[in-house]
Image: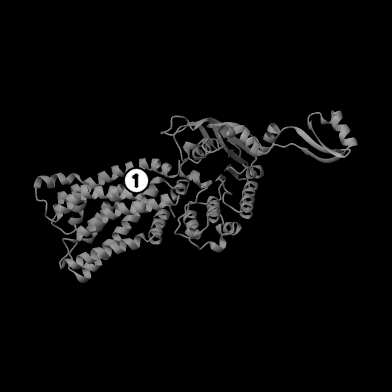
Amino acid sequence: MFGVKNLTFKYPKNKQNTINGVTFKIKEGEVFGLLGPSGVGKSTTQKILIKLLHKYSGEVLYKGDDIKSYGKNFYQEIGVGFEMPVHFSKLTANENLNFFKKLYKANANTDYLLKRVGLYDDRNKKVSDYSKGMKGRLNFVRALLNNPKILFLDEPTNGLDPKNARIVKDIIKEFKQKGGTVLLTTHLMNDVDELCDRVAFMADGKIAEIDTVKNLKVKYGQRKVDIEYKNHETLEKESFDLNHLGMNEKFLRIIKTKEIITMHSKETSLDDIFIKVTGVEKHG
Amino acid sequence: MGSFLVLLLGEIQRMKKYNILAASVLISLIWIGIMHFTGIHDVTQIFPLFIFLDVTSMSILLIGVTMFFEKQEGIIKTLMVSPISKAEYILAKTFANSISNIETLIILYVYAKLFKEININMVGLFSAVVLVSFFHSLIGFVFTYYSKDFTRLLMWMITYSFVFMTPVLLEQVGMIRNEGMKKIFYVIPTKTSMILLNASTGGIKPWEVYLSVFYLLIISILLYFVVLKKFDEFAIKESGV
């Protein structure tokens, strides 16, 4: 759906490039996570993809055509969910949504969406009377109101309680099931683990790693299994390499002759991979 | 409904909700109060002066106020990812401004017609208001682009009033009589605005009206393209880049 090739961008007041030769693809119908510490170029990359920044070098293709060749109708197919509130505070939620709906050819059933995110009963309240979480959910509805084909979501569950975060994640999954494509930017690795098909980690304006979540876990995981077992009256621990485990005589002897208390394969979390790949520890 | 019309109606709705139209009515009432207490019965000659003050300063201010609200509330971000063009956005704001100015014009005219004497070409005045309001709304955009906050916008407005409006007002009330000075004033847009508004009362030479219309149209078109060109820069800055 999107093809980004050798994308480079520098802000006029900066000495260095914010993005340095970034190349990746977002496939139709996938949830693609763009991850990394603050200031590495995630938001800038997203702003280029939604045509907010123009003076870049490299190539950005949308459905095979240069993104620069698209006019305002590009936004008929795009939904953007911002992290910060983006609504007229002295208008009600309904008035806000009705105003924006009129700008689009296709409209979603916003009453249904408001019900899903638990804002229907408050739809006639002014947005200024909304809590932070309510404003976040309204942003999410705003992003969906034109039945977009691709959703750009920036921290969609930020500030939400677990129940509402679950609802938002469920709607994202349903959107994907219906063939929608999502570019997700978040710091919450649990959301990434649950929602993303593929992720790209950015560091210093470059893509440091890009793959499926599963492959990354395999790649960065310590392929080991830890065993706790009883040896007479004492509790002992051993760690074995997962490779050729079935031929490891010591491992086989333990599981045949000892009482096993616990046995865990060591799986690296996305948080660990994030830290390792982006060098966030190095930067402090 | 086209995007322009949606944006225009949205502007008017918000001008009501944010009490901007109410403030505009309040200012009209202040002008009425001044007209009332001047004791002048035939207000034909001073009427364009009130309209001049409203159309010039209020146009600049209204653009600034609505855009600062939008900046504060993050609206510019979401508008930039909506299927609208920047020309539609700019024109919707300027036309909404004209509607507010026309509202003031109607209120003042109704008062003058009911309680005073007035002899004015309303079609001519109406057209002049639209053109002058359009130009000054664009000035409002430029000032907003270069203002970090509302105080800075007010500073720009005060500077503009002092440099461009004061000489015209002094000439209007007869305090500037030097012919050379009067000719120099033709290059400032407030002078041509005043000529157009005064033309509705009669007594203005046709060439002055034609020159003023031509001049104001040309500088409005030029300014429109400047506003259009600088909009991206402003919007990107305001969207948090």
How many numbered discs, if any?
1
At a point 33% along the width and 50% down the height, the residue shown is: B151
- At which x and y percent is residue B79? 45, 49
The chain ID associated with circle 1 is B
- At which x and y percent is residue A15? 43, 29
- At which x and y percent is residue A175? 62, 48
Left or right: B55, with B173 as reference point: right
Q: Is residue A89 visible?
A: yes
- Give whichever of B70, A236 is nearer the camera: A236
Compared with residue A249, is residue A125 higher up or lower down, i.e. above or below?
Answer: below
Pick out the residue farthest to the front: A233
Q: Can residue B94 be seen in this view?
A: no
Q: In which quarter of the image is residue B9?
A: bottom left
Pick out the residue farthest to the left: B178
Q: In which quarter of the image is the N terminus of chain B?
A: bottom left
- At which x and y percent is residue B231? 38, 43
Q: Quadrant of the C terminus of chain B?
A: top left
Q: Residues within 10 Å of mark 1 (few under 14, many from 20)?
A: some
At a point 23% along the width and 50% down the height, the residue shown is: B161
- Give whichever of B142, B207 is nearer the camera: B142
Left or right: A248, with B220 as reference point: right
Pick out the residue farthest to the right: A257
Left or right: B14, with B192 as reference point: right
Q: Name the residue under label 1.
A: B147
At a point 34% along the width and 45% down the height, the residue shown is: B147
Query: Which amino acid type corresponds to the residue marked 1 in the rendered image?
Result: Ser
Q: In the structure shown, which secondary structural element does the residue marked by tag 1 occupy?
A: loop
Q: How is the image coloured?
A: one colour
